[in-house]
Image (cartoon, grey):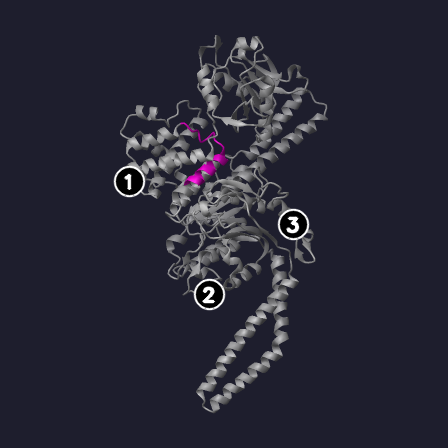
Amino acid sequence: MGKAANGKANGNDKSLISTKRDEKNGKIWSHLRKRWLDETPEERVRQEYLCVLVNEYGFALEQMDEEIDVTGHRGSGHARADFVIWRTAQDKSDSKNPLIVVECKSDNVTICREDYTQGDNYARLTGARFFVTHNTRETKYWRALHDRMPKTLEEIDNIPHADASDKEIEALIAKLKVFKEDEFAQLLHECHNVIRNREKLDPAAAFDEIAKILFVKVFVERQLRDFKRRENLFTVEVLERQLGDDPLNDLFEKTKREFKVDQIFDPEEEIRLKPATGKEIVRRLEKYNLSATSEDIKGIAFERFLGRTFRGDIGQFFTPRTIVEFMIRMLEPKEGDVICDPASGSGGFLIRFFEIVRQQILADADRQYQEYKTSLDGKKLSDAKKAQSLRDQYDEIQATIEQKQEGSRLWNLANRCIFGTDANDRMARTSKMNMIMHGDGHGGVHHHDGFINVNGIFEGRFDIVLTNPPFGANVEPGDVILESEIEVERSVYRQYKEEYGDLYVDAQARVRALKEKPIASLFELPKGEKSKVKTEILFIERCLALLKPGGRMGIVLPEGVFNNPSLTYVREFCEDRAFIRAVVSLPQETFYSSGASVKASLLFLQKFSAKEQAEFDKKREQARKEIDAKYAKEIDAETHRLNAAIDAAKQARDAGARKAAQKELAEYVRAMDAQKRAEARVLLKERFAYPVFMYEAEKVGITATGEADQNELYPNENTPPGLEKTCVELYREFQKDPNRFFVNGSGE
């Protein structure tokens, strides 16, 4: 986290301290207040961080204070900072403005913007130049902008150490830690160019080398964090001190071992760069701390880099983050939902699902703790007993959300709820890497054809399916189901059979029965095994099949699917299996920056429950029977007339008349079948009627060139002026009361 400081600095004797506990009496020692305190979870976080400030940053106890009222003489009420740190002990004695204010939170609390604002207020009240928000989940550092309006927050890389010079402090203040997504994306692009120019590699191969080095960086930072290692091995300085011809590849070997079970790299794979090129990439990346960087920033930067790198090279187009965010919000994921993206690309939908549900779990854990804490207020307990009760409850709640603990809420989220697959091996690897950077969930992501079952991905299993499938390509009759795509190791088969039961067994049997047959034979929508079919058409059916009854689905589709007369059968296929909940039309330029020019819309469906499907099927059959009955006499009469004409032509041996009558009969039957289907569909829609939310968006948060833009899709800081409600907000109102959106049957 920082460098340790021993000996003398600022004229104060610095000695290491440790957290002291009296477990028998439930006490924890405050080195600053020099007394035993009741060990509440919050107090534990505070005293442990004090050790970090002393041992790693080198601050002396004499230049710090704890739990002090920062309002002073201002009379604005009590506002107590956990720690206030002065530049020197003399500054503290002279009541000068402090250098740093620290605000600690318990681990169950997810640090939110309000906490940053509180720290900002404390820094302003005291005149401090830095403030810190901390719990053991995350620590963020900020510079206090005293010449700017409150809540003008700017995150920085770190706080100064005790022995920092004035020049070092000024440099740190000037160094924004949260490298903006554009800055990091540009850095990755520069690294990409270095590799291409020096090694003469094509764009995709150059990306592979960057991916390896980024994984090395992730591995080293994990080691620094998990094992409290002080020396960062991911620096040119350290690499140059190592023995051997290629120390970077030595680190890569350790990295491969770390991620072996994830099957990200082949055992024989190595970084295929000249040592000098590898060092140059390390030099450019070493100053950034990925593990301490906002996951959102990393994700945006990484995906922008991906889009820029792969656009047009391998036909991979990435869904803009604003569209991912909107589609996720429309489906409202919750804990326990299981998600799949059968064309996962860089993993955007899966990552955002993980982030949102993780936030829900942590917020719920905090709610449980705070409710328990409040419940103790009305009880006659000593402070010691209250602290003990809080510790017990806190530890009990923590056990339920420890991500490394099998069976915990976060473990289940990361290991049992997130699945994806991509037919491109490079994208599958990229998706795994992206998810690891975001906190995990990558174990369910596979390199595999999204149309074919693999491991935990099979029909009838998912609460949510979200995808942006490839457009325009065809599945050809020659694309068949290969043994290599459906073979499953016995141990894996037993594992999934035990976990999912007959649903899994039946799904595997269906695919095996069609081995060596065309992939299209797995589906109902293709009109024949000998015809090719658009991939987006098959993905619609695949996504519906993957859903559980009642499951929700969001898919990006070319607009032709919604209005092309030749695709009516596709729309009816959806209507026969699911509620059309919403259709949101996107601007033409939405995907320009990703390299796609097709105008697209978003389709949101909810698969029928068993009861709803039975009701729909019953009404569909009734409608068919009524329309059949309506035309029965007319059809009987006309077919009788035409059959008589055919018979007469046969008797007269008039081949021309016979063929003309047969043609007329065939055309009549086809025309009447089409008319009956159309009328039965109209009747069915009247009897199985429900409202559909329709919205045409103009501003979706991204310009044609990929720049940030106004966004009317969901609440954000950049909504168009005058916009009263975003699309998501209108949809929520529509769900509660669709009638208020209509006047005399026409939309408002």
Which amino acid does the dot numbered 2 rest on?
Lys
Marks 2 and 3, Cα distance to the nearest angstrom? Answer: 37 Å
- Considering only order in the chain, which callout, 1 or 2, is on the residue closer to the N terminus? 1
According to the picture, the residue beneath numbered tag 1 turns out to be 200
In the image, taking residue 699 as reference, residue 268 lies left or right, namely: left
Marks 3 and 1, Cα distance to the nearest angstrom? Answer: 56 Å
- Considering only order in the chain, which callout, 1 or 3, is on the residue closer to the N terminus? 1
Label 3 element class: helix
Which amino acid does the dot numbered 3 rest on?
Phe
Q: Mark 3 packing: few (<14 Cα in 10 Å), some, or many (20+)?
A: some
Q: Looking at the image, do the residues carrying marks 2 and 1 touch, with CB atoms under 8 Å apart?
A: no
Which amino acid does the dot numbered 1 rest on?
Lys
Mark 2 or 1: the one toward you: 1
Q: Mark 2 packing: few (<14 Cα in 10 Å), some, or many (20+)?
A: few
Q: Looking at the image, do the residues carrying marks 2 and 3 touch, with CB atoms under 8 Å apart?
A: no
According to the picture, the residue beneath numbered tag 2 turns out to be 527
- Residue 302 in magenta stretch: yes
Q: Residue at x 37, y 26 (%)?
A: 233
Number of the label disc, if any, that sits on residue 6: none
Q: Residue at x 61, y 19 (%)?
A: 125
Where in the figure is residue 393, as x and y percent of width and height?
A: 62, 29
Where in the figure is residue 433, as x and y percent of width and height?
A: 42, 39
What segment carries the magenta color?
A: 287-305
According to the picture, the residue beneath numbered tag 3 turns out to be 734
Label 1 element class: loop
Residue 40 in view, yes or no:
yes
Residue 241, placed above or below residue 341 = above
Q: Quadrant of residue 204?
A: top left
Residue 513 in view, yes or no:
no
Q: Looking at the image, do the residues carrying marks 3 and 1 touch, with CB atoms under 8 Å apart?
A: no
